Image (cartoon, grey):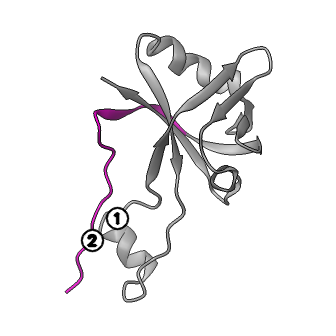
Amino acid sequence: CVVLREPLVCQGARPVGPSFSITESDGNVIRALDGMEVTAALEPVLKEFSSAKLMAGVSVPVRPAAALPADAAASAGAPASPYVVRAVLGYSRRESALAVGTNPELLEAPDARLQLHAFS
């Protein structure tokens, strides 16, 4: 018997805006999303959710279960990569940079993604 569990964001957070591929980072500072400067990618989301307390969801690489082939997990609806929600430490329009309170290795991982989350 195989039981798939789906990780969920808790503590009142909900994902907002699109999920972006992290295409350039320096330490814990994200410089480019989906090949665009951070400012160009995030401004529409920041305008729409300007009154919300936003945090950064960063994808966490996962390994498929040894007994479950990766394609079986995907077809069963298992998420490809869950997110950990971390604090936004700073955002600079001028520098086009988003500092996130996470381990830089997560930002540099292959297929790393960013999803903003709003807290109610």
Q: Which comes before the other along the chain, label 2 or label 1?
A: 2
In the displayed structure, does residue 81 sit left or right of residue 6? Answer: right
Q: Residue 93 occupies which quadrant of the picture? A: top right
* Whether label 2 touches label 1, CB < 8 Å: yes
Q: Is residue 49 above or below residue 76?
A: above
Q: SS of the residue at dot 1?
A: loop
Residue 32 in percent (x, y) is at: 73, 35
Question: Which secondary structure class fits the magenta region best?
Answer: loop
Given residues 54 and 78, the one toward you in this image is 54
Q: Residue 11 occupies which quadrant of the picture? A: top left
Residue 79 in percent (x, y) is at: 39, 60
Q: Which residue is mark 1?
A: 78
Query: Which range of residues does the magenta coloring cover?
Result: 1-19
Q: Is residue 26 above or below residue 65?
A: above
In the displayed structure, does residue 36 sit left or right of residue 53? Answer: right
Q: Is residue 67 above or below residue 71?
A: below
Q: SS of the residue at dot 2?
A: loop
